[in-house]
Amino acid sequence: MIILGILLSFAVIGFFCWLLFTLAVFALPFFAGVSAGLWAYHTGAGWLGAIIVGLVCAALTLGIGQFLLIVVQPLWARMLITLAFVAPAALAGYHATHGIVKHTMPSEPWQIVFSIIGAVAVGATAFMRVAAMAAAVPAGQRLARA
């Protein structure tokens, strides 16, 4: 029975790590959607209105980010747009790793070291996924500059 609990714990941790790496790109739209939804709720929109406002805001954030990655030509501007998506993902990776490591090792400096390693790993994964979103459109099909 103890072995089953240990195996189940490994499976759950593995699932949450996979989920974190898969959804890391959507940290910025999620944050924007939650913030807009909370704002709408606190201004009297009700829970249904808050959910709708949050979903619309999250979709717009992701859509505008992808549109800007397609339209913007200078590399420095594309890096800034990419950084806007990668920074919240790295922060989420730090806190997710810290939450896991805090329960497994007592040494606080090592908790921080492993949390930073987790943040770098999640940030690098988010960077690669955002770069793949930007490279999904062939260069010849980009919008013409006015």
Image: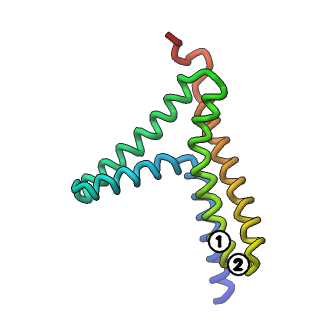
Q: Residue at the location (66% across, 73% down)? A: 10
The amino acid beneath tag 2 is Thr
Return the residue nearer the eye: 11 or 134. 134
Q: Which mark is residue 72?
A: none
The crowding category of the residue bearing disc 1, from other C-alpha atoms within 10 Å (few below 14, some 14 to 19, many at least 20), is some
Dividing the picture into quarters, in which one does residue 60 lie? Answer: top left
9 lies above or below 17: below
Q: Residue at the location (47% across, 52% down)? A: 31
Dividing the picture into quarters, in which one does residue 2 lie? Answer: bottom right
Discs 1, 2 touching: Cβ within 8 Å: yes
Return the residue nearer the eye: 129 or 50. 50
Residue under label 2, please give it.
Answer: 104
Residue located farthest toward the top when viewing the structure as drawn: 146
Q: Residue at the location (36% across, 48% down)? A: 55
Return the residue nearer the eye: 81 or 124. 81
| Residue 54: percent from left, percent from top | 35, 50
Query: Mark 2: which secondary structure?
Result: loop
The crowding category of the residue bearing disc 2, from other C-alpha atoms within 10 Å (few below 14, some 14 to 19, many at least 20), is few
| Residue 81: percent from left, percent from top | 57, 35
Q: How many labels, in total?
A: 2
Distance in Å between CA atoms under marks 1 and 2: 7 Å
| Residue 1: percent from left, percent from top | 64, 89
Residue under label 1, please give it.
Answer: 100
Query: Mark 1: which secondary structure?
Result: helix
